[in-house]
């Protein structure tokens, strides 16, 4: 089975459309969204409606911290994120808010766990930035494969399967090359951070999504160009913080 992993869309309609076109061209069997449909970007209603439509057709959709904030509030977020959430919440209707509020924090299928941030205390949205964070995540679950978003930076952490919980000393992480499959070994456990569709932060401003081929047993981080200028124009027209469109240019 070929599974598309998308995350951190952040109301970027142009990036989402480009990624969905690429997904269709790849002929995937399923789509899994790892959260943060809204926040930062200028098209929250369109983004939620598109994901709701995908969910109706069988896609798995997980709640991210920005999705959660629409209902729970955005205290504690950065100033730019809070301003964007205030703007976003004012534009979402009851149907969109209900859809976001009803999303689960995670989804388990066999030896695979899908969650927005980490398997460790997912309701607190911890970042998996290094080997120690990945070890904490894998120690919190017996799943062999954990797929997350949240950091906006593609990375794959792995450790050998063993009877004890993984520790940072045995955890290895690396940044995958775009569009090159990475083999997944049955004797290893993995925490895979899929980059961001709508706001990449790894120095590459192209939209990112993951292609997991369960038959070939590999994972590919695909990069897709989109109309960044159009999205930037929308952010500026909405008078959202300048930092939000600058990030789209630089990809960091």
Image (spheres, rainbow, N blue to C red):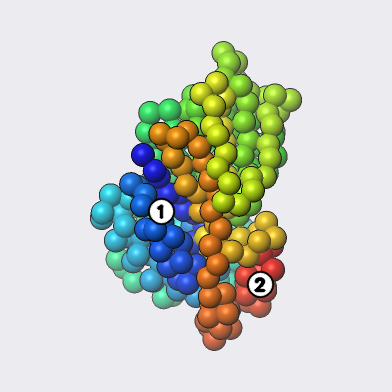
Callout 1 secondary element: helix
- State yes or no: discs 1 and 2 in contact (Cβ < 8 Å): no
Badge 1, how many Cα within 10 Å: few under 14, some, many 20+? few
Q: Is residue 79 above or below residue 144?
A: below
**Residue 248 figure quarter:** bottom right
- Residue lying furthest bottom in this view? 237
Of mark 1 and mark 2, the one earlier in the sequence is 1
- Residue lying furthest left in this view? 56
The reply, left or right, for residue 110 in relation to residue 246 is: left
Between circles 1 and 2, the one closer to the viewer is: 1
Q: Residue at position x 68%, y 36% from top? A: 173
The reply, left or right, for residue 107 in relation to residue 143 is: left
Q: Residue 137 at x, y = what percent?
A: 58, 33
Q: Residue at position x 66%, y 72% from top? A: 249
Q: Looking at the rendering, in which quadrant would you find the C terminus?
A: bottom right
Q: Residue 118 at x, y = what percent?
A: 55, 40
The reply, left or right, for residue 16 in relation to residue 155 is: left
Q: Is residue 199 above or below residue 163?
A: below
Badge 2, how many Cα within 10 Å: few under 14, some, many 20+? some
Viewer can see residue 150: no
Q: Looking at the rendering, in which quadrant would you find the N terminus?
A: top left
Q: Residue at position x 66%, y 78% from top? A: 242
Name the disc covering residue 26, or none: 1
Q: Residue 51 at x, y = what percent?
A: 36, 60
Along the line of sight, the residue nearer the viewer: 5 or 137:
5
Q: Residue 34 at x, y = what percent?
A: 46, 49
Q: Residue at position x 41%, y 53% from top? A: 26
Residue bearing mark 2: 249
The reply, left or right, for residue 60 in relation to residue 175 is: left
- Residue lying furthest right in this view? 169
Callout 2 secondary element: helix
């Amino acid at each position: 089975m070929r599974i598309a992993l998308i995350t951190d869309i952040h109301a970027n309609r142009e990036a989402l459309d480009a990624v969905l076109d690429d997904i269709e061209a790849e002929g995937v069997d399923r789509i899994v969204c790892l959260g943060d449909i809204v926040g930062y970007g200028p098209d929250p209603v369109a983004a939620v409606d598109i994901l709701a439509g995908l969910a109706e057709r069988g896609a798995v959709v997980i709640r991210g911290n920005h999705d959660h904030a629409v209902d729970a509030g955005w205290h504690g977020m950065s100033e730019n994120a809070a301003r964007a959430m205030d703007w976003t919440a004012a534009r979402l209707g009851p149907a969109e808010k209900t859809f976001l509020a009803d999303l689960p924090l995670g989804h388990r299928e066999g030896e695979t766990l899908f969650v927005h941030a980490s398997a460790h205390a997912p309701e607190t949205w911890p970042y998996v930035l290094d080997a120690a964070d990945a070890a904490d995540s894998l120690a919190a679950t017996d799943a062999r494969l954990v797929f997350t978003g949240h950091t906006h930076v593609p990375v794959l952490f792995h450790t050998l399967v063993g009877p004890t919980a993984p520790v940072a000393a045995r955890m290895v992480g690396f940044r995958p090359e775009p569009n090159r499959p990475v083999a997944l070994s049955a004797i290893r456990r993995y925490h895979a951070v899929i980059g961001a569709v709508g706001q990449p932060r790894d120095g590459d401003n192209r939209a990112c999504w993951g292609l997991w081929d369960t038959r070939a047993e590999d994972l590919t981080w695909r990069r897709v160009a989109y109309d960044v200028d159009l999205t930037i124009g929308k952010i500026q027209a909405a008078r959202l913080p300048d930092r939000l469109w600058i990030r789209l240019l630089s990809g960091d």
